Amino acid sequence: MKAHEIMTTDVITVHPDTTVREAAALLTERGITSLPVVDDSNRVIGIVSEVDLIRDRMPHDPRSHLRQDDSEDQKDPAQRVAEVMSDVVVCLSANADAADVAELMLDNNVRAVPIVDGSQLVGIVSRRDLLRTLLRDDIAIETEITQRLADLAGKPNRWPVNVHDGVVRIDGRFDDAPQHDVVVLLARTVPGVIRVHTHRHRWL
């Protein structure tokens, strides 16, 4: 499964001079957790998240604290996205493996990964996009795999397919190991597939 198969293409972006208030409104209204920051050429130059916008903007309620509030002595919080965004952004291509996108999110604790074509932003993959693939109907997955394998074999039902909660079972015999591997690879590219199992050594 590739990034372009699951990414959101209608990407909501902001510019460096967008106000923090405007960015916060976008996140709230659209129900998203981060926004790519782009320049006038639609190149990704940063990303701004909920945490970036919240930081230093929640004053302590004096009714909840015994200590004296010293907020009057602190400087005002940043007003522009350019001042709060992270300018270190890891982007991936549209052909990136969705599993690599997921690993990047987990390893770096990010909620969304911008997808680029060269230097141009073409989409974004969020944790929600990844979760959506887990909800794909088993029948839809089974139908798509069955059609792909029928096209490969040149006839239907050469390899019966069963799917349960995204886990695929492919039965039938294979001519050889390379054919087995092609069948497994075809099945694994279908969105929603979590694992693929076969009778690995059932060669004719």
Image (tube, rainbow, N blue to C red):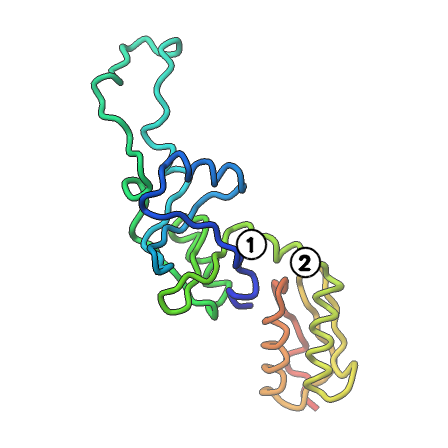
Q: Quadrant of the N terminus?
A: bottom right
Amino acid at pointer 1:
Asp
Residue 36: x and y, percent? 40, 51
Q: What kind of element bears circle 1?
A: helix
Label 2 CA crowd tier, 10 Å (few <14, some 14–19, many 20+): some
Q: Quadrant of residue 80?
A: top left
Horizontal side of 136 relative to 123 (left or right) equals right
Q: Which residue is mark 1?
A: 129
Nearest the viewer among 121 and 189 is 121
Q: Quadrant of the C terminus?
A: bottom right
In the depicted structure, whether residue 113 falls above or below residue 141: above
Question: Which residue shows up at 50% across the image and 44% down it?
Answer: 32
Amino acid at pointer 2:
Arg
Label 1 CA crowd tier, 10 Å (few <14, some 14–19, many 20+): some
Horizontal side of 115 relative to 15 (left or right) equals right
In the depicted structure, whether residue 176 falls above or below residue 37: below
Question: Which residue shows up at 72% across the image and 59% down it?
Answer: 137
Q: What kind of element bears circle 2?
A: loop
Q: Quadrant of residue 129?
A: bottom right
Tell me, for residue 136, which label it has, or none: 2
Nearest the viewer among 173 and 83 is 83
Residue 153: x and y, percent? 71, 87
